[in-house]
Amino acid sequence: MTRSTYTILLGGALTLTARLAAQLSGSRFIAADGGMRHAKTLGVVPDLWVGDFDSTDEALLADFAEVPRENYPAAKNATDGELAVEAAIARGATALIFAGALGGTRSDHAFLHLLQLAALAEEGHAAFMTSGEEEAYALMPGTHEIDLPKGSLFSVLGFTALSGLSIGNARYPLDDFALPFGSSRTISNVAEGPVRFSLKSGRAVVLARPYDLSGA
């Protein structure tokens, strides 16, 4: 099966970096409401634009007038981002990138995006989130490797208590560790290169800062 990657453009912060450009290479795009402004930054034209358009100004509407739109009422039971994800999956997406999912002016939306990332991982979807300067990956039971530059900072945030957590190729490795819910033990680690994770049970996200070498 051909891998089909869709990038969902969301309204949070986004900085175009060399790493981000490489990650988005070959992707198709769907914009969620005001996330369309990032299409200008990235120099792309999305396949679809969804939302209630309450955070989109007339200039942006005019700039991307040729992009097909799915309009929804403001009073609805899903966020614009969730609608964009549904559209991507309906179009055969096998991998999802959320650009502009982190930071921004709405902490509730940013936190929801992290929860959605974990939910998508549970459903078997390959996905990660990025602002260009910060990235988020779901950490579920099993083994995983995240390709991080040597010296970059990363943290593991547990949504539940974690059991059997192992972290390899990092300054502060762990082996079969039980992390209590709410513990700060796994904050501010430093990658020695691609970091290996193993988890027996629980749900978590890895927040990484590939351009932040302050811990090196």
Image (cartoon, rainbow, N blue to C red):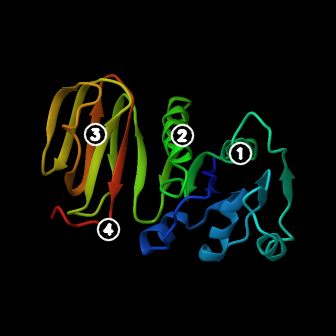
Rendered view: 10 above or below 73: below
Nearer to us in this view, 64 or 47:
64
Q: Gap between marks 3 and 2, in whole Å?
A: 23 Å
Q: Label 2 belongs to which residue?
A: 112
> Is tag 1's residue or tag 2's residue first in the polypeptide sequence?
1
Mark in front: 4 vs 1: 4
> Is tag 3's residue or tag 2's residue first in the polypeptide sequence?
2
Residue 211: image tag = 4
Residue 197: image tag = 3
Query: Do residues under tags 1 and 3 come within 8 Å of each other at their CB atoms?
Result: no
Mark in front: 3 vs 4: 4
Q: What kind of residue is marked 2?
A: Leu
Q: Label 1 belongs to which residue?
A: 92
Residue 24 horizontal/vertical position (percent): 55, 65
Residue 74 horizontal/vertical position (percent): 80, 44
Q: What kind of residue is marked 1?
A: Gly
Q: What kind of residue is marked 3?
A: Phe
Mark in front: 1 vs 2: 2
> Is tag 4's residue or tag 2's residue first in the polypeptide sequence?
2
**In the structure shown, which secondary structural element does the residue marked by tag 1 occupy?**
loop
Nearer to us in this view, 79 or 116:
79
The C terminus lies in quadrant: bottom left
Seen at 73% across and 57% down, the residue is 33
